[in-house]
Amino acid sequence: MTEPHISVSGVSLAYRMSRNRAGTFKEYAISLMRRQVEYEEFWALNDVSFDVHEGEVFAVVGPNGAGKSTLMKAVAGILPPTKGRVVVRGTVSPLIEVGGGLNDELTGRENIVVYGTMLGRDPDEMRERVDQVAGWAGLRQFLTVPVRSYSTGMRARLAFSIATDLRPDVLLVDEILSVGDEDFRLKSFKRIRGMIDAGTTVLLVSHQLKQVEDLATRAMWLDHGNVKLFGDAAEVVDAYTEHVKATREQN
């Protein structure tokens, strides 16, 4: 078997949180200079391991605060693990927050070139593809407008169109398909499906459990940074759904 496109081995990730309750930034700064600031560690991920192979769609489900977005940022290389190791092979397009990677002060046209270059594309090639990228996003008439004036939906469409204009080896998708109108969601779903059929590996985080069942082959349920269940996507979704239902009845 070939090496996995994504390999997460024993990954734990801790955030440092200040115990000090400074009333103002000035008070906090003084405490910091006097080395009076105390920290405690919050473990967002605890010993998480999984592999995702070429052409596979692997989903991560769980409640808010489960560590899903932290995991995606670790896989994207944004957050280094405190313990463990993450290896990603091939070209990567991360869609881990709405409009992530876009610069508010640049125009739509400039963002297409800059964000595409950040993803490893040739700047000249991105300049040639501006019209195609903007056309798919339905934003041709807004190319000369700074992105700060875009709506949330417009930002999501532009970021998605840039990241998926050329098929990456690995696509990281964190709730982006739940943003925007129905037409955008259907277009995005269709484009991702086409990438999957062509061999792109997808790591998907979503609260849309029907979407997980439709796209993913395997899934993992995270809760407070811990792996609760790992296996067939439909089985994981069923178990998680039953847990959510039982919790609501208890409350």
Image (tube, helix red, strand yellow):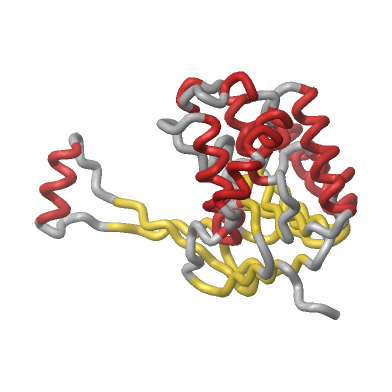
- Residue 59 placed where, x, y %? 76, 52
**What residue lies at 20% left-to-right and 41% top-to-bottom?**
22
On-image quarter of the N terminus: bottom right
Q: Is residue 152 above or below residue 59?
A: above
Residue 28 visible to the viewer:
yes
Q: As rendered, which of 140 and 66 lies closer to the eye?
A: 140
Q: Residue at x 70, y 24 (%)?
A: 138
Q: Of 105 and 53, which appears nearest the observer?
A: 105
Residue in the foreground of this view, choosing between 109 and 226: 109
User: Measured along the vertical axis of the image, is residue 134 above or below residue 172?
Assistant: above
For residue 86, above or below residue 133: below
Q: Quadrant of the C terminus?
A: top right
> Quick check: 144 left or right of 18?
right
Whole-percent x and y of residue 5? Answer: 73, 68
Relative to 178, 22 lies left or right: left
Look at 63% across and 45% down and name the residue there.
95
The part of the image, by quadrant, that contains residue 186 is top right
Total numbered badges shown on the rendered structure: 0
Q: Residue at x 66, y 31 (%)?
A: 134
Q: Is residue 143 left or right of residue 131?
A: left
Residue 207 appears at what percent x and percent y?
Answer: 72, 39
Q: For residue 158, what is the image quadrant?
A: top right
Q: Which of 233 and 242 lies nearest the eye of the viewer? A: 233
Q: Is residue 144 left or right of residue 40?
A: right
Outermost residue, bottom side: 1
Q: Position of residue 52 (x, y in %)?
A: 76, 65
Residue 221 seen = no
